[in-house]
């Protein structure tokens, strides 16, 4: 699933709440699904959940702790919150570790070498840097 497609689903799923959790009933109502067609609805949400979980955007909420507990809703992960701009700190999270051979830490050159991979992982974001020399 493309991140842009995933964002469309998340925007719609979480359109009725400012929180990080949404119930299946709320999602079904947003899409005007008949609540009586539980099997059809669960198949549909199961497909979406598989793709959104693979991207690390949501985690499932279950009624109980047993393996066969019914799904009751979805919770945004930090990555999902970032995609929906629910937290400012989520944008600062880098999923790609930047490696350096130096003992003194990461250099500007290390960051430049990591950028192509970071941009491929985050195609919906414009990634920019602002470097300034410190006085002293």
Image: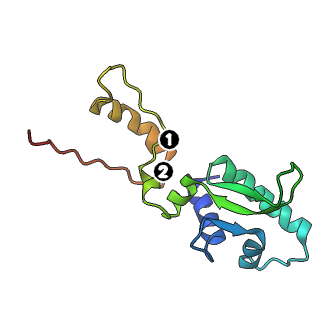
Q: In this view, does 28 lie to the left or right of 14?
A: right
Residue 46, percent from left and from top: 80, 57
Q: In which quarter of the image is the C terminus?
A: top left
The percent position of residue 40, horizontal first and vertical second, equals 88, 67
Q: Name the residue under label 1.
A: 95
Please give the residue where the numbered disc 2 appears in the rendered image.
123
Give x and y (percent) for residue 68.
89, 52
State the CA–CA distance, disc 1 to disc 2: 13 Å
Q: Which of marks 1 and 2 is nearer the N terminus?
A: 1
* Secondary structure at numbered mark 1: loop
Q: Which residue is drawn at 48% across and 63% down?
A: 85
Badge 2 crowding class, 10 Å Cα cut-off, few under 14, some 14 to 19, many 20 or more, is few
Q: Is mark 2 on a helix, strand or loop?
A: loop
Q: How many labels does the image show?
A: 2
In the displayed orientation, state which residue is furthest to the front: 65
Residue that appears at 47% across and 61% down: 87
Label 1 CA crowd tier, 10 Å (few <14, some 14–19, many 20+): few
Q: Position of residue 92 (x, y in %)?
A: 41, 50
| Numbered circle sitting on residue 84 | none
Q: Which of 118 and 96 is in front in this view?
A: 96
Q: Is there CB contact under 8 Å for labels 1 and 2?
A: no
Horizontal side of residue 120 vs 53, given as left or right: left
**Toward which corner of the image does residue 109 lie, by quadrant?**
top left
């Amino acid at each position: 699933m493309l991140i842009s497609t995933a964002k469309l689903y998340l925007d719609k799923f979480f359109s009725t709440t400012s929180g990080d959790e949404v119930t299946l009933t709320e999602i079904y109502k947003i899409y005007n699904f008949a609540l009586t067609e539980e099997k059809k609805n669960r198949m549909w949400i199961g497909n979406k959940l598989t793709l959104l979980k693979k991207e690390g955007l949501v985690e499932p909420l279950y009624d109980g702790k047993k393996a066969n507990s019914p799904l009751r809703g979805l919770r945004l992960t930090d990555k999902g919150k970032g995609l929906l701009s629910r937290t400012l700190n989520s944008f600062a999270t880098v999923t790609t570790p930047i490696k350096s051979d130096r003992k003194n830490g990461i250099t500007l050159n290390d960051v430049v070498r990591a950028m192509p991979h970071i941009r491929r992982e985050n195609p919906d974001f414009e990634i920019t840097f602002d470097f300034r020399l410190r006085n002293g």
